[in-house]
């Protein structure tokens, strides 16, 4: 397989269109987030998701983070709107878009391969404008772990991705160096009921 590298800084619209075309055929695309470069595929399609695992040599028991560009997509990914409690709502308002991943009970739309068969799905809304543009153009959420072979250092430049996955994926969008260089923080919100006990006599 030949890996094409497109400079999205020179022509973002062409790069976004090319990525959407690959994704629409259940292919996978490497592109930057504000954390590291991700390897993205249609989160609703097991065929696309399986290509992510194959390209990375990633074990299937290791779940993926799903990236969204709008809260409307969030509601399609979770089991029930009531899963968004007051704490989750505050975290979303404060940290999305950004490098925060939240765990929610998943909807039936999420393939088992994405979550490694678990009942929770990891979701975040990235703030990188190129990734958001691809999400908007494609229309579906994207499962996207880091764009490197499993166990290797996460890439912060398109050149790193090409070194790791050249010949294994069809397309890399070069958006320059990533801003943060480390993966997002993952949070599971657990509600604990606090009971009040009266003083003994």
Image (spheres, rainbow, N blue to C red):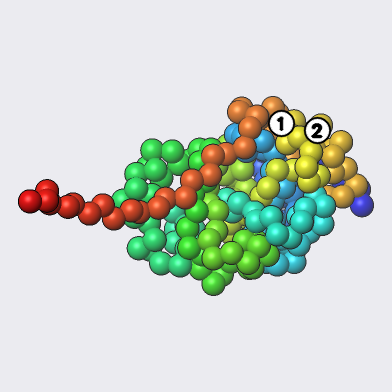
Name the residue at 66% across, 62% down.
116
Q: Are marks 2 and 1 in contact (CB under 8 Å)?
A: yes
Hey, which residue is sitting farthest left in the picture? 201
Q: In front: 137, or 189?
A: 189
Q: Is residue 12 left or right of residue 122?
A: right
Secondary structure under badge 1? loop
The percent position of residue 40, horizontal first and vertical second, equals: 69, 51
Q: Residues within 10 Å of mark 1 (few under 14, many from 20)?
A: many
The percent position of residue 27, horizontal first and vertical second, equals: 76, 58
**Marker disc for residue 137:** none
Q: CA distance from mark 2 to mark 1?
A: 7 Å
Seen in the picture, residue 196 relative to 100 is either above or below; the reply is below
Q: In front: 75, or 19?
A: 75
Q: Residue 23: which quarter of the image?
A: bottom right
Hey, which residue is sitting farthest bottom in the picture? 108
Seen in the picture, residue 14 relative to 1 is either above or below; the reply is above
Q: Is residue 109 left or right of residue 181?
A: left
Name the residue at 65% across, 56% down.
63
Tell me if residue 69 can be seen.
no
Secondary structure under badge 2? helix
Q: In front: 35, or 173?
A: 35
Name the residue at 41% across, 67% down.
80
The percent position of residue 157, horizontal first and vertical second, equals: 74, 30
Hey, which residue is sitting farthest front in the picture? 201
Q: Is residue 92 left or right of residue 1?
A: left
Q: Residues within 10 Å of mark 2 (few under 14, many from 20)?
A: some
Tell me if residue 45 can be seen.
yes
Name the residue at 31% across, 51% down.
86
Which residue position is annotated with label 2?
160
Q: Residue 59: which quarter of the image?
A: bottom right
The percent position of residue 123, horizontal first and vertical second, equals: 53, 52
**Marker disc for residue 156:** 1
């Amino acid at each position: 397989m030949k890996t094409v590298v497109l400079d999205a800084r020179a022509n973002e619209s062409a790069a976004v269109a090319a990525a959407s075309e690959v994704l629409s055929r259940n292919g996978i695309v490497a592109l930057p987030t504000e954390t590291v470069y991700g390897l993205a595929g249609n989160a609703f399609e097991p065929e696309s998701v399986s290509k992510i695992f194959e390209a990375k040599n990633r074990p299937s028991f290791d779940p993926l983070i799903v990236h969204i560009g709008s809260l409307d997509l969030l509601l399609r990914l979770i089991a029930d709107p009531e899963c968004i409690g007051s704490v989750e709502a505050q975290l979303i308002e404060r940290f999305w878009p950004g490098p925060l991943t939240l765990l929610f009970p998943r909807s039936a739309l999420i393939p088992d391969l994405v979550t490694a068969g678990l009942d929770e799905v990891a979701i975040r809304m990235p703030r990188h404008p190129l990734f958001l543009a691809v999400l908007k153009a494609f229309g579906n959420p994207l499962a996207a772990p880091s764009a490197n072979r499993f166990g290797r250092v996460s890439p912060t430049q398109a050149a790193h991705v090409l070194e790791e996955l050249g010949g294994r994926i069809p397309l890399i969008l070069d958006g320059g160096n990533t801003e943060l260089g480390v993966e997002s923080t993952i949070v599971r919100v657990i509600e604990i009921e606090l009971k009040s006990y009266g003083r003994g006599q």
